[in-house]
Amino acid sequence: MPRSKTTTKGRPVAAALFLLSLAFSLQAAPKLKPYDLELEAYPAAPFPSLGRFGTVTLHLYPGGVRADSFWLNAFSRKGAKTVTVMNPVMRMYTDVPIPEITSIVAKATRGEEIETTAPPIVGPTSGKVGALRASRYRLVYGPAAWIDVWTIAEIPEHAQFRAVVHSLVAGISASTAKAVRAVPGTPVYIELNFRRFHKVPLLRLKSLTWSNGGEADAMKVGSYYLRAPLLDAIWR
């Protein structure tokens, strides 16, 4: 059989064409814009034992999530296995493994759980939360009992936020936490509709801005803080 006429002279040309096409594909790939999704959470609405937190302000950034309350502040960086919890009055902080949040919440809300049965999910139903297009997923516990979870796809799913939320909800109801985990998107509005909690918001959208100017400061411990060996040292 005659040998191929391809020579090494053509290889640099082929390599150049490959690198050129790769460069164009990289330039065409969408670049994630910086953002700051600000939410408000109301943990005391269904759980009076969490009243000391008051309204919790949340900030979701590409690099992590930040929470500020009347009592404690916290942040968790993208990919971290812990949440850094700070007491701004005592100027102390500690790192709490995310899985441990479940037992902490379970202890704090003992006897206040909403439901223990696994709810089916109805949805999505299209709508809006503020000016953002959103999808509603309804966790149905009965004919007149449900939780509405509205999510957006405006920003990518925030894995760190979802991990922390799952641990929080699991401390109240493991079955509800499992259902919430199956809901796609980023939650921006959550509402309870039960006999004792009629149209009670747990989470509400405040704003979405395409800037993360405050992210660097939000993802670090403040000045002159001392590390506490255990959460109990600042859980007062």
Image (cartoon, rainbow, N blue to C red):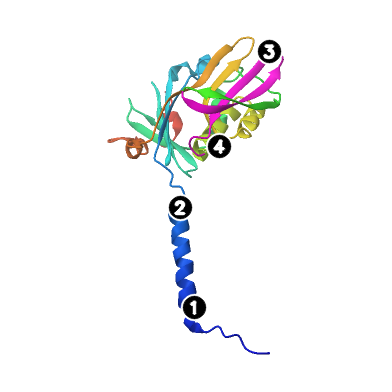
- Nearest to the eye among marks 4 and 1: give it: 1
- Circle 1 Cα neighbour tier, 10 Å, few/some/many (<14 / 14–19 / ≥20): few
Amino acid under disc 1: Arg
The N terminus - image quarter: bottom right
The C terminus - image quarter: top left
Which quadrant holds residue 115?
Answer: top right
* Visible residue check, residue 114: no
Q: Residue at x 47, y 63 (%)?
A: 21
Residue 225 rendering spot, x and y as whole percentages: 31, 35
Q: Is residue 197 magenta?
A: no
Q: CA distance from mark 2 to mark 4?
A: 39 Å
Please say if 117 is above or below 227: above
> Along the polypeptide, which appears first: circle 3 or circle 1?
1
> In the rendered structure, which segment of residues is drawn in magenta?
131-156
- Nearest to the eye among marks 3 and 2: give it: 2
Q: Report the disc number at residue 28.
A: 2
Please say if 45 is above or below 103: above
Residue 72 rendering spot, x and y as whole percentages: 40, 26
- Circle 4 Cα neighbour tier, 10 Å, few/some/many (<14 / 14–19 / ≥20): some
> Along the polypeptide, which appears first: circle 3 or circle 2?
2
Where does label 4 land, which residue? 99
Q: CA distance from mark 2 to mark 1?
A: 26 Å
Which element type, helix, strand or loop, lies under badge 1? helix
Asked whether disc 4 touches disc 1, contact meaning CB atoms under 8 Å apart, the reply is no
Residue at the left extreme, as displayed? 224
Please say if 172 is above or below 186: above
Where does label 1 land, which residue? 11
43 and 206: which is toward the camera: 206
Which element type, helix, strand or loop, lies under badge 3? loop
Q: Is residue 146 magenta?
A: yes
Q: CA distance from mark 4 to mark 1?
A: 54 Å
Where does label 3 land, which residue? 144
